[in-house]
Amino acid sequence: MELSKNYTPAAVEGKWYQHWMDKGYFRSKPDNRPPFTIVIPPPNVTGVLHMGHTLNETVQDILIRRARMSGYNTCWVPGSDHASIATEAKVVNMLKTEKGIEKSQLTREEFLKHAFEWKEKYGGIIYSQIKKLGCSCDWDRVTFTMDDHYYKAVIKVFTDLYNKGLIYRGARMINWDPKAKTALSDEEVQYKDLQGKLYHVQYAIADPSGEPTGQFITIATQRPETIMGDTAICVNPEDDRYKHLAGYFAIVPLVNRRVPIIFDTYVDKEFGTGALKVTPAHDINDYNLGLKHNLEVIDTLNDDGTLSAAAGVFIGEDRFVARKKVIATLHEHGLLIKEQEYTTRLGYSERNPDTVVEPRISTQWFVKMAELTKPALDAVVNGDVNIHPGDRFLATYKYWMENVKDWCISRQLWWGQQIPAYYAPDGTFEVANSIEEAIAQFKAKGADYKASDLRQDEDCLDTWFSSWLWPMEVFNGISQPDNEEIKYYYPTNVLVTGQDIIFFWVARMIMAGLEYKHEKPFSDVYFTGMVRDKLGRKMSKQLGNSPDLLELIDRFGADAVRFGIMISSPAGNDLLFDDASCEQGRNFCNKIWNALKLVKMWEDRVAPGTNAGNDHFAIQWFESRLNEVQQQVAELFKDFKLSEALKIIYSLVWDDFCSWYLEWVKPGFEQPVDAAIYSKTVYFFEQLMQLLHPFMPFATEEIYQQLQNRTAGDDLIVKQYTAPATPDASILVQGALAKEVISGIRDARNKHQIKPKDQIALHIDTTQENTFKQIEEMLAKQVNAKSIAYTKTAIPNCINMVVQKDKFYLETETELDPAAQKEQLEKDLVYLQGFLVSVEKKLSNERFVQNAKPEVVDAERKKKEDAEAKIAAITESLKTL
């Protein structure tokens, strides 16, 4: 079959993905092989793959494909998360805009019916994109966090933790999202440094009997709209300015409420005016002061962020609209005496990034974290769970685990697992797995209720409370604790995820795994970096700088996109994504395709019965080079240095194989091809495709199949790696020397305008004559030398050049300019002298020598030796000109 001019991804990718699916290569069942298990970080059912997902899924597929080709029974479980806040917001918006229905008009059951319809309509989009990227997931195992078995598992865990005393219900100051109208955990609040204002406001002072004194006390506040909720003014007892106000009162502006002036060392005398308005309902520190001083709590905000009736003024106005009106009214009454620019930190909702979070006292459900965190902290600190890169994230993990607060897990939403607490008419409740169990528990306590008497808690659980069970429940490990699959596949091998959910998800999965399986959920955690655009900005829909994955695949092909995102993404480091890297990936595919076409051209020119090529230096060199890279890649995979592995493979294929090896073994025009050389070349090509396959699966499978006729089942995706042989170090040194000499001679020919067809006589002054004799024939062919001779003296009227410690004289019929030669050698000498200074400076730096890896220091010392030898050789050559 005639090969197309260029590699065409569209003609290849769908064909091979379907073939792999039809063959069942992605499916996994427990057997006698060691398992290699990955569970996908479940993307939200709401969306499409962004570039962060693309990086994440590509890394997982690389690991799975490598493991599959290494003899493991690979199982990659796909799935999605119900994403309670984000999905409910989308469903509410859809109902309002498309059907004119408000959520408040629906029962819970009616709303959930619409939500599941929405999920069925949009939930499959993300899976089709994952397939398009080439991900080899076990599609028979797709799991959704609202699946029936998963729902029951979440309820079972809630009930168990409640019975253990690790879940409790209580009124606490929490984070509130006024847009989603729900509580948030501390980890769902993102803080931003902003330029705000401090408003200096006067409060009239009344004496202990309540009579006005005509005096004022000034406070500084960032949030004047909360003034109506003030229940005290607090000053430092050591502040001489205010000691005389003991027993006095302040009058709250706008509402004329009399509140006490209290004293507490919490107040910073130097900040603002040294006087603090205390609003226990709207600030965590004020709340704690209120508890300490037994202050009234007045909540002036509704759940949607508008002012409540308790505010007394501007009722129903949005909090930020009310702020402007409060400021205007204070100014009108002469109570606003100053506005001051001020840098502050504001918390925003992680799910609604434009929404400022409100501190709010609310009755919620909480998980006690202290008991759960210690084993999970020990697992990472002791190395049972390894974090990559550990040097960056271990300290972060440790700090959070040592300072964690109780986890608010209730959400004022309907889309999610409904909290299994059942309330009796008298307000008492029972936590149970079902209403029938709750009735039995009430009965055991002497209370006889029917199902119609009980009311289930309206709230649902935080999404992360379901996803922390993910590595277990995808194998039914909570709902059916002793089934064969959980025993075979758990613990999983690697978790690949973003660093931004180290606390939301990673830490909590370790806690849940140790609590319910008494075993870590995974052995390694690979943190990908954040994908940014080429200007360094975080990719987002708002900025419009996040490319569409399917569009990228249509333009470049899935392999090129995978290459583009992996070539610049070392573990844990942010990467600057530019679609130019996808173009590089496409060019790489075409480079390999052209190499395939070249090799296929030789197929009909193989000389039967010839095997002399086995002794060809190029074969010996490339075999050692291949073995060397196979060993390096294996080590890099152990350390999860996937980007580095791809770069090494890229260089091996593009440079060593395509640019050097194929040139070294290429037959002359219309000349036959030695059978051994052809056989070895096809073998090397297959080995390279096998090495590259995890990174670029489609192109490598296509090229592997095109290289020669395959028997059924001989597919690259399941071709097993063999252990590489030990490379021949001396051959590798010879190969490196040959490349450097050939490049140097070609460069010298170009500089002196010697045409490619013009032959030269090559004279070599070397101590390595035997080395050069082994590659004479190849060297002569590559530089078009009619003869190669060895000399111990300088040859006059030649082009002089130096490679390592050896001197080369290029004799040519072209007339040479000695002055030009001298000028060129002097330029080379100046460059080398400068280079030597820089290397010596580095080696004289004690910190570098002590801290750098030994191989890095050795490489610098080798550079120094080579530079010194070249300087000596050039200096000697200059004497002859």
Image (tube, rainbow, N blue to C red):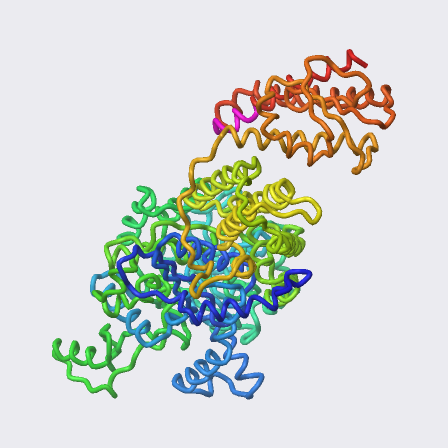
Q: Does the magenta stretch include residue 322?
A: no
User: Is residue 272 visible to us here?
Assistant: no
Check the image and name the residue furthest to the front: 609
* 325, 179: nearer the viewer: 179
Q: Quadrant of the N terminus?
A: bottom right
Q: Does the magenta stretch include residue 857?
A: yes
Q: Main secondary structure of the magenta part?
A: helix
- Residue 571, percent across and down? 49, 47
- Residue 22, percent across and down? 44, 72
Per the rendered image, the range of residues in magenta is: 853-860
Q: In which quarter of the image is the C terminus?
A: top right
The structure residue drawn at horizontal position 51% and vertical position 61%, both measured from the top left corner, is: 709
User: Is residue 622 visible to us here?
Assistant: yes
Q: In which quarter of the image is residue 867?
A: top right
- Residue 317, percent across and down? 57, 74
Residue 343 higher or lower than 856, as above or below: below
Residue 538 higher or lower than 17, as above or below: above
Residue 673 higher or lower than 479, as above or below: above
Q: Is residue 517 left or right of residue 831?
A: left
* 273, 776: nearer the viewer: 776
